[in-house]
Image (cartoon, helix red, strand yellow):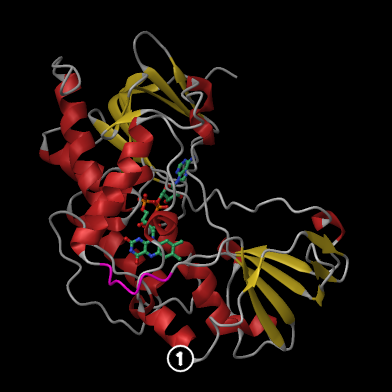
């Protein structure tokens, strides 16, 4: 299939926090919407991954959404679903700054060419860009670890990404797997209606009792940054910080839900799970709250992976492909990180377009 690409200076892939922040700063640097840059987003509307958060997730149940640059979030209603409130904010933002977001455009591949450009492909449409800012987040790449026997389970499996409401679990015997904040939050909701709700984690969870302060945030970011500079896969924030004290954790603790945690089972049977010592637990549902990975399969043609399994980064820039920036990746995989990474990537890309080369080289 031959499709003539549209030529533009910069393609931003993804319109979540990180992609919109990048677009804002490209615009501010003077790039024209269209010939200067476009944003390609796989969704049907504004909001990034927030469009898909489960309806019971309210703003008072999350860490907090950092402002997009240039337009504060103000004080949104904490009792409305986060999915609606954040999507509304993003829609208004795109409008206010006239950001050229094209939807739905799922990008399937980024490869070399034509000439010294990068070719960005989606079904039926292509773009040839001088630089690409990838901001595709993690929501489209749920991670489920493998356990033997998992294919024989007669009950229902689902991942955090599939969760809609606790009602679906009424009267069920549910196992929630995972040591992060989502696991604890979903366990808390489900335990109010389920016949049984059991929490299992691979390692004993580490409750730090610390609040998630800005200084603490910076320590975590520095740790993940060291990893990606060394070409290692980024780790999730919780695996670096342990569990900080949020309202959700406090609720779970007050209800005694955290005391019943079990270690990871060793295999799945048709009717439940079994531990190495032979102990069996019957279950109808296994909920894998086991996290996400970077949704970057479309970058595979560029062959960026290092022997360490990650992509070697210098700030937001990919060391092996300086025309490509990853924002919302690794150390910038948070709303505050995404906003900052967008500014950094836009500045470096703008310098690259002017022939100044990557900063620091
Ligand atoms: P996303 O919001 O995921 O946006 C990525 C966009 O790219 C999406 O629109 C997606 O459709 C699009 N896309 C993906 N692949 C493609 C493709 N191939 N082609 C085209 N488009 C594509 N962080 C916080 O800082 N505070 C919080 O309170 C917080 N709460 C969270 C709660 C939950 C339940 C979860 C799962 C995460 C939470 N996070 C929170 C982390 C949060 O995901 C990030 O902070 C941030 O929202 C990610 O922004 P992003 O722009 O990187 O990605």
Quadrant where the N terminus is found in the figure: top right
Q: Is residue 30 above or below residue 145?
A: above
| Magenta-colored segment: predominant secondary structure | loop
* Residue closer to the observer: 49 or 255: 255
**Residue placed farthest to the front in the image?**
277
Q: Position of residue 196 (x, y in %)?
A: 70, 85
Q: Position of residue 49 (x, y in %)?
A: 44, 57
Q: As drawn, is 29 to the left or to the right of 315?
A: left
Quadrant containing ligand 1: bottom left
Quadrant where the C terminus is found in the figure: top left
Give yes or no for residue 324 being in the magenta stretch: no
Residue at the spot of label 1:
254
Q: Is residue 67 visible?
A: no
Q: Mark 1: which secondary structure?
A: helix
Q: Position of residue 359 (x, y in %)?
A: 16, 24
What range is drawn magenta here? 207-212
Q: As drawn, is 58 to the left or to the right of 77?
A: right
Give yes or no for residue 208 being in the magenta stretch: yes
Which residue is depicted at the point 45% across and 67% down?
206
Which residue is depicted at the point 28% across and 35% down?
316
């Amino acid at each position: 299939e031959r499709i003539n690409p549209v030529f533009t200076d910069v393609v931003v892939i993804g319109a979540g926090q990180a992609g919109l922040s990048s677009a804002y700063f490209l615009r501010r640097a003077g790039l024209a919407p269209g010939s200067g840059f476009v944003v390609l987003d796989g969704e049907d509307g504004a909001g990034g991954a927030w469009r898909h958060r489960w309806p019971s997730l309210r703003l008072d149940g999350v860490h907090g959404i950092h402002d997009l640059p240039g337009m504060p979030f103000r004080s949104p209603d904490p009792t409305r679903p986060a999915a609606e409130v954040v999507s509304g904010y993003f829609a208004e933002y795109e409008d206010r700054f006239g950001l050229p977001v094209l939807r739905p455009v799922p990008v399937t591949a980024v490869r070399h060419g034509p000439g010294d450009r990068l070719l960005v492909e989606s079904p039926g449409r292509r773009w040839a860009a001088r630089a690409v800012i990838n901001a595709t987040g993690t929501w489209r790449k749920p991670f489920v670890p493998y356990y033997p026997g998992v294919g024989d389970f007669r009950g229902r499996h689902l991942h955090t990404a599939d969760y809609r409401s606790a009602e679906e679990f009424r009267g069920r015997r549910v196992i929630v797997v995972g040591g992060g904040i989502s696991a604890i939050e979903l366990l808390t909701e489900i335990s109010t209606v389920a016949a049984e709700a059991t929490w299992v984690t691979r390692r004993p969870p580490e409750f730090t009792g610390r609040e998630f302060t800005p200084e603490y945030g910076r320590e975590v970011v520095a740790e993940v940054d060291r990893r990606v500079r060394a070409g290692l896969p980024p780790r999730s924030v919780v695996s670096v910080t342990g569990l900080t004290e949020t309202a959700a954790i406090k609720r779970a603790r007050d209800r005694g839900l955290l005391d019943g945690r079990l270690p990871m089972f060793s295999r799945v049977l048709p009717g439940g799970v079994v531990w190495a010592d032979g102990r069996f637990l019957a279950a109808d549902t296994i909920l894998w709250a086991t996290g996400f990975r970077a949704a970057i399969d479309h970058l595979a043609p560029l062959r960026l992976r290092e022997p360490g399994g990650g992509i070697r980064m210098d700030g937001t820039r990919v060391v092996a492909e300086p025309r490509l920036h990853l924002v919302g990746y690794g150390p910038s995989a948070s709303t505050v990180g995404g906003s900052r990474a967008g500014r950094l990537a836009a500045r470096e890309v703008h310098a690259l377009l002017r022939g100044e080369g990557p900063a620091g080289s």
